[in-house]
Image (spheres, grey):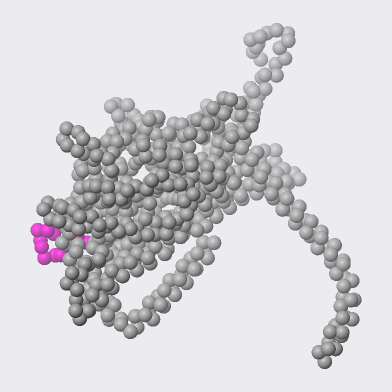
Amino acid sequence: MSAPANDSQDYVGFDTITQQMERKFLKRGFNFNVILVGESGMGKSTLVNSIFSSHLVDSQGRRTAQEVIRKTTEISPVTQTLEENGVRVRLTIIDTPGFGDQCNNEGCWVPVIKYIKDQHAAYLERELKPQRDRVINDTRVHACLYFLNPGSRGLRPLDVEVLKRLTEVTNVIPVIAKSDSMTVEERTAFKRRIKEELVFHRIAVYPYPSEEDCDEDRALNSSIRDLVPFAVVGSEEIIDVNGTPVRGRRHGWGVINIFDETHSDFVHLRNFMLRTHLSDLIEVTSQRHYEQFRTSQLRQIKELRAQQAAAAASGGIMGSMPQQVPPQVPAVHQPMA
Amino acid sequence: QAGLGRRTFLNTLCERAVIASPDAPNPETANVADPMKFDTYEVAMEEEGTRISLTVIDTPGFGDGLDNTSCFKQLQDYIEAQFDEVLVEESRVKRNRRYRDHRIHVLVYFIAPTGHSLRELDIELIRRLGEYVNIIPVIGRADSFTVEELDAFRANVMRDIVYYKLPVYNFCWDETDSEALVENREIMDHIPFSVVTCDEVFDNEYGSVRIRRYPWGTIEIDDEAQCDFALLRYILLNSHIADLINYTEDMLYENYRTRKLEVGGYGENEEEEDDDEEEQALGAASKKQE
């Protein structure tokens, strides 16, 4: 062990716990699960591939005429292990092809909500086992990127319905992908509209205000909340701009550099999701959404058991009833005869 | 659908603000889907010496609700109502000389720039309405595409149109005029037309231009290399007005009339049966989704 800076005899040394935790963490690695919700053609796959700087998911849109139009929302998770500076993450991206694509979109969110709840249920089951694993493989959804249509004036009816339900089960981060078709004024107006509507419908998007936050955190969170929804542009191509390779899009009238802060909020979104709030996302999922689910499930089980006990008890009472009934029956029949 | 630039397209087409953009709507109406309405606007325009009385019907609310299957029937009924009016007027003993024809000559359909292919909503609409009205498919908000993406998307849409045999307006329907045929074939290559429109006008050294300004560049609407708006405007208001009107009157209306008069007495029963089948199919579909 290297000698610490203040090498006095009063130095205890418990501040090295951070290094110990780090070592353990490095060995174990961690899980991070993100679900992408939005209509096809919104740029979900491209955005995710841009955030993680590697081709993780293929776009599931319908490209050839022979492909059949999906009739329901499908859930397709893809897991990969990424490594950066010795830290390993098991990243699962869950795509939802078919969401919002039909003429009649009633109930298209049901498979999505069901999937998220199933993950909570699976975790709960493993937790409740008498002999449970030391480390449970965490498949719970930690973040949901919800894609808004850049053209609409504000939230659409479908958006409101789905967001209300999604925010109850997971952390939702609203995103405007393909925002390169909006001018800066349109973008600001749209963001303001969305924020008003979210407040009106009482839809709570991540990050949530919490009393435990210190001033620094609060300042960071409020600057993030200003940016919500993030207007991003994704790209998997590296194009050449005056000799320097840049990740971006080349239009006939200009080149977009997705890392440029004046062009899009991509950098902010990536920093927010991965560099500052990654562990918070995982923690909040466990502490808030999972706990809510767990409480309601355990309460249901308790009520069910109470009902069964009551039914068993009343079964004993039922045994004495038949004796009373027969004397009554002849009394009823007499007037009719 | 909302957000594809219909209003701005109309304003740019007529070079004046025909439809005002709705003022800051309140958040309460966000989740209430407006049922599809038909808003009619009449614009008198002068285009290279000819006076055109343009009637535009906007359909806000199409495709915006959760369940959009009733939108098609509404549109179909509307168009048929116009045809029926003309049918009745024609069959009158004493016709009104000043009768104004409200038949719809062209339907401009805005496709969302997804980058994939056509959606179910698009395919259904074109399929159902193609026999009643000339449909010109247009890519709204085409500034979200790069040049390669636009070409790829166009190819995908055309493939879908061919595969599903969608009845879009065929510019080459009149085979007799060979000169126009060559021009029309070139026009067909541009289908679906990419449209970018804006309300703002800026003055620069060449006069007033309509541009959209982004942090990374500006796009000029009227530049033909950048989008097809100028071409589309020319087609709609200049070169193909006669064609579109003729096709509507000679082919679409005549087919409708023949169908309507042929069927005659059986007509009502058949329609009822079709409606019942439609309802059952929709009912089954919605049950499956639940």
- Relative to B159, does residue A34 appear above or below in the rendering? above
Question: In the picture shown, does residue A336 fall above or below A299?
Answer: below
Residue A256 horizontal side relative to residue A291, left or right: left
What quarter of the picture does the N terminus of chain B occupy? bottom left
Of helix, strand and loop, which mostly describes the magenta segment? loop
Task: Please report the bounds of the magenta region as a residue range.
Answer: B170-182
Check if residue B180 falls in the magenta segment: yes
Q: Is residue A145 visible?
A: no
- Residue A294 image position (x, y, % from top left): 68, 46
On the image, which quarter does residue A250 sit in?
A: top left
Classify residue A277 as left or right of residue B148.
Answer: right
Q: Give the residue displayed 38% in from the left and 51% down from the top.
A: B2
Q: B81 or A100: nearer the eye?
A: B81
Residue A145 screen position, x and y as percent: 50, 42
**Residue drawn at point x = 27 percent, y = 36 percent:** B218
Quadrant position of residue A262: top left
Residue at the limit of the structure toward the top, as seen here: A8
Taking the magenta stretch, the answer to whether it contains residue B52 is no
State the image coordinates of residue B262 (x, y, percent, origin top left): 27, 81
Q: Quadrant of residue A319?
A: bottom right
At horizontal 58% and vertical 33% (from top left) the residue drawn is A279
Q: Give A174 or B117, whichever is nearer the viewer.
A: A174
Spot occupied by residue A7 in the image (x, y as percentages of width and height): 68, 8
In the displayed structure, A40 sits above or below B210; it is below
